[in-house]
Image: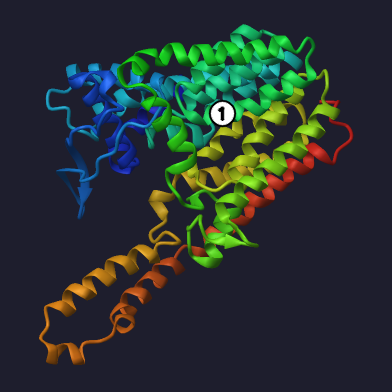
Amino acid sequence: MAGLILRLLLILVSPRYGYLFDHDDQVRWGIQATDQGVLTLYDHPPPRWNIRCRHDGRWVITQRPFDRVYHYPPVTAYMLYASGLVFKVASADRLINTVISRAIFSFWGIGADFVLAWGCAALVAIYGAGRAVKWTYLLVLFLPPLWWDSTMWGQFDAVPLAGSVWFVWALVRRRWVLAGVLLGLAAAVKPQAVLCLPVLALAVWVCKPRWKPLLTAGVAAGVLLVVALPFTLHGGWAWLRLSYLSTLFDKFPSTTLNAFNLWYADLLVCDSRDVSATWLGLSKDSLGRLFVLLSLTAGFVWMARRWRGDGRGLVLWSGLVILAFVMLATRVHERYLLMVLPFLMVAAMWWRRFWPGLAALLVVACCQLTWPLWLGEPAGGWDNHLQAGTWRYQQARAALSPQEQETFPNLTEYLEPQRRKYLAGRAETITLEWCVTILALLGAAGIVGAAVFRSDMGKP
Protein backbone atom coordinates (compact mmCIF):
# COMPACT_ATOMS: atom_id res chain seq x y z
CA MET A 1 0.00 0.00 0.00
CA ALA A 2 2.85 2.39 0.83
CA GLY A 3 4.35 1.83 -2.63
CA LEU A 4 1.04 2.74 -4.26
CA ILE A 5 0.54 5.81 -2.07
CA LEU A 6 4.04 7.02 -2.95
CA ARG A 7 3.30 6.76 -6.65
CA LEU A 8 -0.08 8.48 -6.34
CA LEU A 9 1.51 11.38 -4.48
CA LEU A 10 4.09 11.73 -7.22
CA ILE A 11 1.35 11.77 -9.85
CA LEU A 12 -0.10 14.84 -8.11
CA VAL A 13 3.10 16.81 -8.66
CA SER A 14 4.12 15.23 -11.97
CA PRO A 15 2.48 17.94 -14.15
CA ARG A 16 4.95 20.45 -12.71
CA TYR A 17 8.08 18.39 -12.17
CA GLY A 18 7.63 15.48 -14.59
CA TYR A 19 9.17 15.10 -18.03
CA LEU A 20 6.85 16.80 -20.48
CA PHE A 21 7.77 15.70 -24.00
CA ASP A 22 7.32 11.93 -23.64
CA HIS A 23 3.97 12.49 -21.95
CA ASP A 24 2.87 14.76 -24.79
CA ASP A 25 3.81 12.08 -27.34
CA GLN A 26 1.94 9.35 -25.49
CA VAL A 27 -1.27 11.30 -24.99
CA ARG A 28 -1.32 12.51 -28.58
CA TRP A 29 -0.81 8.96 -29.81
CA GLY A 30 -3.64 7.86 -27.51
CA ILE A 31 -5.88 10.57 -28.96
CA GLN A 32 -4.94 9.56 -32.50
CA ALA A 33 -5.72 5.91 -31.73
CA THR A 34 -9.16 6.69 -30.30
CA ASP A 35 -10.16 9.28 -32.90
CA GLN A 36 -8.64 7.84 -36.07
CA GLY A 37 -8.18 4.17 -35.16
CA VAL A 38 -5.30 2.37 -33.49
CA LEU A 39 -4.08 0.97 -36.82
CA THR A 40 -3.28 4.48 -38.10
CA LEU A 41 -0.50 5.03 -35.56
CA TYR A 42 2.29 3.98 -37.92
CA ASP A 43 0.78 5.89 -40.84
CA HIS A 44 1.37 9.52 -39.84
CA PRO A 45 2.05 11.76 -36.83
CA PRO A 46 -0.78 12.53 -34.40
CA PRO A 47 -2.59 15.88 -34.46
CA ARG A 48 -1.24 18.62 -32.25
CA TRP A 49 -3.14 19.09 -29.01
CA ASN A 50 -3.34 21.60 -26.19
CA ILE A 51 -0.77 21.02 -23.49
CA ARG A 52 -0.51 22.66 -20.07
CA CYS A 53 3.00 23.69 -19.05
CA ARG A 54 4.94 26.14 -16.90
CA HIS A 55 6.34 29.25 -18.55
CA ASP A 56 7.93 32.16 -16.68
CA GLY A 57 6.52 30.92 -13.39
CA ARG A 58 2.93 30.48 -14.49
CA TRP A 59 0.75 27.90 -16.20
CA VAL A 60 0.04 28.42 -19.89
CA ILE A 61 -1.78 26.38 -22.51
CA THR A 62 0.02 25.89 -25.79
CA GLN A 63 0.73 23.25 -28.43
CA ARG A 64 4.08 21.58 -28.83
CA PRO A 65 5.46 22.38 -32.32
CA PHE A 66 6.85 18.91 -32.84
CA ASP A 67 5.31 15.93 -34.60
CA ARG A 68 6.56 12.36 -34.31
CA VAL A 69 5.17 9.19 -35.85
CA TYR A 70 4.47 6.43 -33.33
CA HIS A 71 7.54 4.21 -33.03
CA TYR A 72 6.85 1.58 -30.35
CA PRO A 73 5.77 -2.05 -30.93
CA PRO A 74 2.11 -3.08 -31.23
CA VAL A 75 1.20 -4.01 -27.62
CA THR A 76 2.16 -0.53 -26.47
CA ALA A 77 -0.18 0.79 -29.17
CA TYR A 78 -3.04 -1.21 -27.66
CA MET A 79 -2.12 0.14 -24.21
CA LEU A 80 -2.16 3.72 -25.45
CA TYR A 81 -5.46 3.07 -27.18
CA ALA A 82 -7.00 1.81 -23.93
CA SER A 83 -5.65 4.82 -22.03
CA GLY A 84 -6.94 7.11 -24.77
CA LEU A 85 -10.45 5.68 -24.42
CA VAL A 86 -10.44 6.27 -20.66
CA PHE A 87 -8.99 9.74 -21.12
CA LYS A 88 -11.72 10.64 -23.61
CA VAL A 89 -14.35 9.81 -20.99
CA ALA A 90 -12.54 11.32 -18.00
CA SER A 91 -11.54 14.64 -19.59
CA ALA A 92 -13.87 16.60 -21.85
CA ASP A 93 -11.13 18.77 -23.38
CA ARG A 94 -8.42 16.09 -23.10
CA LEU A 95 -5.90 18.70 -21.98
CA ILE A 96 -2.39 17.23 -21.79
CA ASN A 97 -0.22 17.38 -18.65
CA THR A 98 -2.89 17.41 -16.01
CA VAL A 99 -3.18 15.11 -13.01
CA ILE A 100 -5.88 13.20 -14.92
CA SER A 101 -3.78 12.70 -18.04
CA ARG A 102 -0.72 11.75 -16.01
CA ALA A 103 -2.64 9.23 -13.91
CA ILE A 104 -4.35 7.55 -16.86
CA PHE A 105 -1.25 7.18 -19.00
CA SER A 106 1.00 6.20 -16.05
CA PHE A 107 -1.32 3.37 -15.06
CA TRP A 108 0.58 0.75 -17.04
CA GLY A 109 3.98 1.61 -15.65
CA ILE A 110 2.75 1.84 -12.07
CA GLY A 111 0.97 -1.50 -12.28
CA ALA A 112 4.04 -3.13 -13.83
CA ASP A 113 6.20 -1.89 -10.94
CA PHE A 114 4.36 -4.27 -8.61
CA VAL A 115 4.54 -7.17 -11.07
CA LEU A 116 8.27 -6.51 -11.45
CA ALA A 117 8.86 -6.56 -7.68
CA TRP A 118 6.89 -9.79 -7.45
CA GLY A 119 8.97 -11.34 -10.23
CA CYS A 120 12.26 -10.44 -8.54
CA ALA A 121 11.01 -11.94 -5.28
CA ALA A 122 9.97 -15.08 -7.16
CA LEU A 123 13.48 -15.39 -8.61
CA VAL A 124 15.08 -15.08 -5.17
CA ALA A 125 12.62 -17.64 -3.80
CA ILE A 126 13.92 -20.32 -6.19
CA TYR A 127 17.21 -20.49 -4.29
CA GLY A 128 16.22 -18.83 -1.02
CA ALA A 129 13.30 -18.22 1.28
CA GLY A 130 12.04 -16.22 4.23
CA ARG A 131 13.07 -12.63 4.79
CA ALA A 132 15.26 -12.46 1.67
CA VAL A 133 12.17 -12.89 -0.51
CA LYS A 134 10.17 -10.23 1.34
CA TRP A 135 13.07 -7.79 1.36
CA THR A 136 13.57 -8.29 -2.37
CA TYR A 137 9.95 -7.37 -3.07
CA LEU A 138 10.13 -4.26 -0.87
CA LEU A 139 13.50 -3.06 -2.13
CA VAL A 140 12.58 -3.41 -5.79
CA LEU A 141 9.20 -1.79 -5.24
CA PHE A 142 10.82 1.24 -3.63
CA LEU A 143 13.82 1.61 -5.94
CA PRO A 144 13.74 5.37 -6.73
CA PRO A 145 14.58 5.06 -10.47
CA LEU A 146 11.61 2.71 -10.97
CA TRP A 147 8.94 4.84 -9.36
CA TRP A 148 10.42 7.99 -10.85
CA ASP A 149 10.31 6.48 -14.32
CA SER A 150 6.70 5.30 -14.03
CA THR A 151 5.39 8.58 -12.57
CA MET A 152 7.58 11.55 -13.45
CA TRP A 153 8.61 10.23 -16.86
CA GLY A 154 5.29 8.44 -17.36
CA GLN A 155 7.13 5.68 -19.20
CA PHE A 156 6.18 2.03 -19.72
CA ASP A 157 9.71 0.70 -19.13
CA ALA A 158 8.56 -1.38 -16.17
CA VAL A 159 6.18 -3.33 -18.43
CA PRO A 160 8.79 -5.04 -20.66
CA LEU A 161 11.17 -5.18 -17.70
CA ALA A 162 8.61 -7.10 -15.64
CA GLY A 163 8.07 -9.40 -18.62
CA SER A 164 11.85 -9.91 -18.91
CA VAL A 165 12.22 -10.80 -15.23
CA TRP A 166 9.38 -13.32 -15.40
CA PHE A 167 10.88 -14.63 -18.67
CA VAL A 168 14.14 -15.37 -16.84
CA TRP A 169 12.15 -16.94 -14.00
CA ALA A 170 10.44 -19.23 -16.53
CA LEU A 171 13.82 -20.16 -18.05
CA VAL A 172 15.24 -21.05 -14.66
CA ARG A 173 12.17 -23.18 -13.91
CA ARG A 174 12.41 -24.78 -17.38
CA ARG A 175 8.94 -23.60 -18.42
CA TRP A 176 9.86 -23.09 -22.03
CA VAL A 177 6.48 -22.25 -23.58
CA LEU A 178 5.66 -19.73 -20.84
CA ALA A 179 9.09 -18.18 -21.32
CA GLY A 180 8.35 -17.78 -25.03
CA VAL A 181 4.99 -16.12 -24.39
CA LEU A 182 6.54 -13.70 -21.90
CA LEU A 183 9.44 -12.84 -24.21
CA GLY A 184 7.09 -12.29 -27.14
CA LEU A 185 4.88 -9.96 -25.11
CA ALA A 186 7.86 -8.04 -23.72
CA ALA A 187 9.21 -7.60 -27.25
CA ALA A 188 5.79 -6.36 -28.35
CA VAL A 189 5.95 -3.57 -25.76
CA LYS A 190 9.44 -2.15 -26.32
CA PRO A 191 12.32 -3.17 -28.62
CA GLN A 192 14.80 -3.22 -25.73
CA ALA A 193 13.50 -6.74 -25.05
CA VAL A 194 16.02 -7.90 -27.67
CA LEU A 195 18.53 -7.85 -24.80
CA CYS A 196 16.86 -11.07 -23.64
CA LEU A 197 18.20 -12.88 -26.69
CA PRO A 198 21.74 -13.41 -25.32
CA VAL A 199 20.11 -14.85 -22.19
CA LEU A 200 18.06 -17.24 -24.30
CA ALA A 201 21.21 -18.13 -26.27
CA LEU A 202 22.93 -19.14 -23.03
CA ALA A 203 19.93 -21.29 -22.10
CA VAL A 204 20.11 -22.99 -25.50
CA TRP A 205 23.81 -23.68 -25.02
CA VAL A 206 23.73 -25.05 -21.48
CA CYS A 207 20.33 -26.76 -21.28
CA LYS A 208 19.56 -30.24 -22.57
CA PRO A 209 17.78 -31.06 -24.77
CA ARG A 210 18.46 -27.89 -26.73
CA TRP A 211 15.26 -28.04 -28.74
CA LYS A 212 13.28 -26.96 -25.67
CA PRO A 213 14.83 -23.48 -25.26
CA LEU A 214 14.77 -23.22 -29.06
CA LEU A 215 11.03 -23.78 -28.76
CA THR A 216 10.97 -20.69 -26.53
CA ALA A 217 12.40 -18.62 -29.39
CA GLY A 218 9.78 -19.94 -31.80
CA VAL A 219 6.92 -19.24 -29.40
CA ALA A 220 8.22 -15.70 -28.78
CA ALA A 221 8.40 -14.96 -32.50
CA GLY A 222 4.91 -16.39 -32.98
CA VAL A 223 3.42 -14.28 -30.19
CA LEU A 224 5.00 -11.12 -31.59
CA LEU A 225 3.71 -11.81 -35.09
CA VAL A 226 0.20 -12.63 -33.86
CA VAL A 227 -0.20 -9.45 -31.78
CA ALA A 228 1.19 -7.42 -34.69
CA LEU A 229 -0.99 -9.10 -37.31
CA PRO A 230 -3.64 -6.34 -37.48
CA PHE A 231 -0.91 -3.77 -38.15
CA THR A 232 0.74 -6.05 -40.72
CA LEU A 233 -2.54 -6.44 -42.61
CA HIS A 234 -3.13 -2.69 -42.44
CA GLY A 235 0.28 -1.29 -43.33
CA GLY A 236 2.66 -4.14 -44.09
CA TRP A 237 5.89 -4.17 -42.10
CA ALA A 238 5.83 -0.50 -41.13
CA TRP A 239 5.49 -1.49 -37.47
CA LEU A 240 8.70 -3.55 -37.68
CA ARG A 241 10.63 -0.81 -39.46
CA LEU A 242 9.56 2.00 -37.12
CA SER A 243 9.55 0.22 -33.79
CA TYR A 244 12.60 -2.02 -34.25
CA LEU A 245 14.88 -1.27 -37.18
CA SER A 246 14.69 2.51 -36.93
CA THR A 247 14.75 2.63 -33.13
CA LEU A 248 17.70 0.28 -32.74
CA PHE A 249 19.84 1.45 -35.66
CA ASP A 250 18.82 4.83 -37.09
CA LYS A 251 17.10 7.04 -34.53
CA PHE A 252 18.87 9.38 -32.12
CA PRO A 253 22.35 9.42 -33.74
CA SER A 254 24.12 10.55 -30.56
CA THR A 255 26.96 8.87 -28.71
CA THR A 256 24.90 9.14 -25.52
CA LEU A 257 21.46 10.47 -24.63
CA ASN A 258 22.41 11.64 -21.12
CA ALA A 259 23.46 8.14 -20.07
CA PHE A 260 26.52 8.33 -17.83
CA ASN A 261 28.69 5.69 -19.44
CA LEU A 262 31.90 5.35 -21.45
CA TRP A 263 30.55 7.68 -24.13
CA TYR A 264 29.52 10.33 -21.65
CA ALA A 265 33.15 10.46 -20.49
CA ASP A 266 34.08 10.93 -24.15
CA LEU A 267 31.43 13.64 -24.42
CA LEU A 268 32.84 15.53 -21.44
CA VAL A 269 36.27 15.49 -23.07
CA CYS A 270 35.40 16.41 -26.67
CA ASP A 271 32.02 18.13 -26.16
CA SER A 272 30.49 16.34 -29.15
CA ARG A 273 27.83 13.64 -29.49
CA ASP A 274 28.66 12.89 -33.13
CA VAL A 275 28.51 9.09 -33.60
CA SER A 276 30.26 9.37 -36.96
CA ALA A 277 33.40 10.90 -35.45
CA THR A 278 36.32 8.47 -35.52
CA TRP A 279 38.41 6.80 -32.87
CA LEU A 280 41.37 4.71 -34.04
CA GLY A 281 40.05 4.75 -37.59
CA LEU A 282 36.53 3.57 -36.66
CA SER A 283 33.42 5.62 -36.04
CA LYS A 284 32.34 5.87 -32.43
CA ASP A 285 29.12 4.11 -33.40
CA SER A 286 31.08 1.16 -34.78
CA LEU A 287 33.40 1.11 -31.78
CA GLY A 288 30.47 1.01 -29.40
CA ARG A 289 29.02 -1.99 -31.19
CA LEU A 290 32.45 -3.65 -31.27
CA PHE A 291 32.91 -3.13 -27.52
CA VAL A 292 29.50 -4.66 -26.83
CA LEU A 293 30.17 -7.60 -29.14
CA LEU A 294 33.55 -8.36 -27.57
CA SER A 295 32.24 -8.07 -24.01
CA LEU A 296 29.23 -10.28 -24.73
CA THR A 297 31.38 -12.87 -26.49
CA ALA A 298 33.83 -13.07 -23.60
CA GLY A 299 31.01 -13.07 -21.08
CA PHE A 300 29.12 -15.79 -22.90
CA VAL A 301 32.16 -18.08 -22.98
CA TRP A 302 32.80 -17.52 -19.28
CA MET A 303 29.15 -18.02 -18.29
CA ALA A 304 28.80 -21.17 -20.41
CA ARG A 305 31.83 -22.74 -18.70
CA ARG A 306 31.22 -21.51 -15.16
CA TRP A 307 27.42 -21.75 -14.84
CA ARG A 308 26.45 -24.83 -16.79
CA GLY A 309 23.57 -26.47 -14.94
CA ASP A 310 23.07 -23.61 -12.43
CA GLY A 311 19.99 -21.51 -13.09
CA ARG A 312 21.35 -18.55 -11.14
CA GLY A 313 23.76 -18.01 -13.99
CA LEU A 314 20.86 -17.00 -16.24
CA VAL A 315 19.90 -14.26 -13.77
CA LEU A 316 23.47 -13.01 -13.44
CA TRP A 317 23.98 -13.13 -17.22
CA SER A 318 20.80 -11.08 -17.71
CA GLY A 319 22.25 -8.28 -15.61
CA LEU A 320 25.68 -8.45 -17.25
CA VAL A 321 24.20 -8.30 -20.77
CA ILE A 322 22.22 -5.15 -20.02
CA LEU A 323 25.15 -3.61 -18.16
CA ALA A 324 27.45 -4.14 -21.14
CA PHE A 325 24.91 -2.52 -23.43
CA VAL A 326 24.25 0.58 -21.29
CA MET A 327 27.92 1.19 -20.48
CA LEU A 328 29.58 0.48 -23.84
CA ALA A 329 27.06 1.07 -26.64
CA THR A 330 26.31 4.42 -28.27
CA ARG A 331 22.77 5.88 -28.55
CA VAL A 332 21.88 4.73 -25.01
CA HIS A 333 19.07 6.60 -23.22
CA GLU A 334 19.37 7.69 -19.62
CA ARG A 335 16.48 5.42 -18.57
CA TYR A 336 18.08 2.21 -19.84
CA LEU A 337 20.24 1.81 -16.72
CA LEU A 338 17.17 1.03 -14.62
CA MET A 339 16.73 -2.20 -16.62
CA VAL A 340 19.81 -3.71 -14.99
CA LEU A 341 18.87 -2.86 -11.39
CA PRO A 342 16.28 -5.63 -10.74
CA PHE A 343 18.63 -8.38 -11.93
CA LEU A 344 21.49 -7.00 -9.87
CA MET A 345 19.19 -6.74 -6.87
CA VAL A 346 18.40 -10.45 -7.16
CA ALA A 347 22.11 -11.25 -7.48
CA ALA A 348 22.89 -9.09 -4.44
CA MET A 349 20.33 -11.00 -2.39
CA TRP A 350 22.28 -14.18 -3.22
CA TRP A 351 25.82 -12.76 -3.01
CA ARG A 352 26.62 -9.76 -0.82
CA ARG A 353 29.65 -8.76 -2.87
CA PHE A 354 27.33 -7.21 -5.48
CA TRP A 355 25.98 -4.58 -3.08
CA PRO A 356 28.75 -1.95 -3.54
CA GLY A 357 28.44 -1.98 -7.32
CA LEU A 358 24.66 -2.01 -7.13
CA ALA A 359 24.63 0.93 -4.71
CA ALA A 360 26.88 2.93 -7.04
CA LEU A 361 24.69 2.24 -10.07
CA LEU A 362 21.58 3.10 -8.08
CA VAL A 363 22.99 6.57 -7.35
CA VAL A 364 23.91 6.96 -11.02
CA ALA A 365 20.43 5.91 -12.14
CA CYS A 366 18.86 8.49 -9.83
CA CYS A 367 21.04 11.21 -11.33
CA GLN A 368 20.35 10.06 -14.88
CA LEU A 369 16.59 10.01 -14.55
CA THR A 370 16.44 13.41 -12.84
CA TRP A 371 18.69 15.30 -15.23
CA PRO A 372 15.86 17.56 -16.50
CA LEU A 373 15.72 19.04 -12.98
CA TRP A 374 19.41 19.87 -12.56
CA LEU A 375 21.23 19.80 -15.92
CA GLY A 376 20.89 23.31 -17.30
CA GLU A 377 23.28 23.35 -20.27
CA PRO A 378 23.79 19.82 -21.66
CA ALA A 379 27.20 18.79 -22.89
CA GLY A 380 27.64 18.70 -26.65
CA GLY A 381 25.12 21.49 -27.18
CA TRP A 382 27.44 24.02 -28.75
CA ASP A 383 26.89 22.62 -32.25
CA ASN A 384 23.21 23.53 -31.99
CA HIS A 385 24.04 27.00 -30.67
CA LEU A 386 26.58 27.43 -33.47
CA GLN A 387 24.07 26.50 -36.15
CA ALA A 388 21.38 28.83 -34.79
CA GLY A 389 23.88 31.62 -34.18
CA THR A 390 25.29 31.33 -37.69
CA TRP A 391 21.80 31.65 -39.16
CA ARG A 392 21.11 34.75 -37.07
CA TYR A 393 24.45 36.22 -38.08
CA GLN A 394 23.72 35.71 -41.77
CA GLN A 395 20.29 37.28 -41.43
CA ALA A 396 21.60 40.28 -39.52
CA ARG A 397 24.46 40.83 -41.98
CA ALA A 398 22.17 40.51 -45.00
CA ALA A 399 19.97 43.32 -43.66
CA LEU A 400 22.88 45.79 -43.60
CA SER A 401 24.13 48.08 -46.34
CA PRO A 402 27.54 47.33 -47.93
CA GLN A 403 29.12 50.13 -45.88
CA GLU A 404 27.67 48.77 -42.62
CA GLN A 405 28.81 45.24 -43.46
CA GLU A 406 32.43 46.44 -43.54
CA THR A 407 32.29 47.35 -39.84
CA PHE A 408 30.08 44.44 -38.80
CA PRO A 409 31.92 41.89 -36.60
CA ASN A 410 32.97 38.61 -38.14
CA LEU A 411 31.23 35.36 -37.22
CA THR A 412 33.67 34.44 -34.44
CA GLU A 413 33.33 37.83 -32.77
CA TYR A 414 29.55 37.76 -33.17
CA LEU A 415 29.27 34.34 -31.50
CA GLU A 416 31.78 35.02 -28.72
CA PRO A 417 29.21 36.24 -26.13
CA GLN A 418 27.04 33.21 -26.78
CA ARG A 419 30.09 30.95 -26.53
CA ARG A 420 31.00 32.44 -23.14
CA LYS A 421 27.42 31.94 -21.95
CA TYR A 422 27.49 28.32 -23.08
CA LEU A 423 30.77 27.63 -21.28
CA ALA A 424 29.48 29.30 -18.12
CA GLY A 425 26.39 27.10 -18.23
CA ARG A 426 28.51 24.00 -18.69
CA ALA A 427 30.75 24.99 -15.76
CA GLU A 428 27.78 24.86 -13.38
CA THR A 429 27.34 21.08 -13.59
CA ILE A 430 30.42 19.60 -15.28
CA THR A 431 32.02 18.58 -11.97
CA LEU A 432 28.91 16.67 -10.95
CA GLU A 433 28.72 15.06 -14.39
CA TRP A 434 32.31 13.87 -14.10
CA CYS A 435 31.70 12.48 -10.62
CA VAL A 436 28.60 10.55 -11.65
CA THR A 437 30.23 9.26 -14.85
CA ILE A 438 33.26 7.98 -12.94
CA LEU A 439 30.94 6.43 -10.34
CA ALA A 440 29.02 4.69 -13.13
CA LEU A 441 32.17 3.20 -14.64
CA LEU A 442 33.48 2.14 -11.22
CA GLY A 443 30.13 0.61 -10.31
CA ALA A 444 30.00 -1.36 -13.55
CA ALA A 445 33.59 -2.51 -13.06
CA GLY A 446 32.71 -3.54 -9.51
CA ILE A 447 29.81 -5.67 -10.74
CA VAL A 448 31.95 -7.38 -13.36
CA GLY A 449 34.74 -7.90 -10.84
CA ALA A 450 32.35 -9.40 -8.31
CA ALA A 451 31.06 -11.80 -10.96
CA VAL A 452 34.35 -12.83 -12.53
CA PHE A 453 37.15 -12.62 -10.02
CA ARG A 454 35.60 -14.52 -7.12
CA SER A 455 35.90 -18.28 -6.95
CA ASP A 456 33.07 -18.91 -4.49
CA MET A 457 30.17 -17.83 -6.68
CA GLY A 458 28.53 -21.19 -6.14
CA LYS A 459 27.92 -20.33 -2.48
CA PRO A 460 25.12 -17.75 -2.11
Residue 13 seen in the figure: no
Residue 450 position, x and y percent, is 78, 40
Q: Looking at numbered disc 1 in the image, what kind of residue is underneath it?
A: Val
* The C terminus: image quadrant: top right
| Closest to the observer, 251 or 5 | 251
Name the residue at 61% across, 61% down. 279
Residue 248 seen in the figure: yes
Name the residue at 59% across, 13% down. 218
> Which residue reaches farthest right?
455
Residue matched to label 1: 194
Q: Would you call the spot at circle 1 few (<14 residues within 10 Å), some (14-19), or many (20 or more)?
A: some
Residue 290 position, x and y percent, is 65, 47
| Closest to the observer, 414 or 358 | 414
Residue 357 position, x and y percent, is 69, 43
Kindly indicate the quadrant of the structure image that contains residue 380.
bottom left
Kindly indicate the quadrant of the structure image that contains residue 365.
top right
Kindly indicate the quadrant of the structure image that contains residue 314.
top right
65 left or right, relative to 190: left
Name the residue at 31% across, 41% down. 21
| Relative to 274, residue 206 above or below | above
| Closest to the observer, 76 or 236 | 236
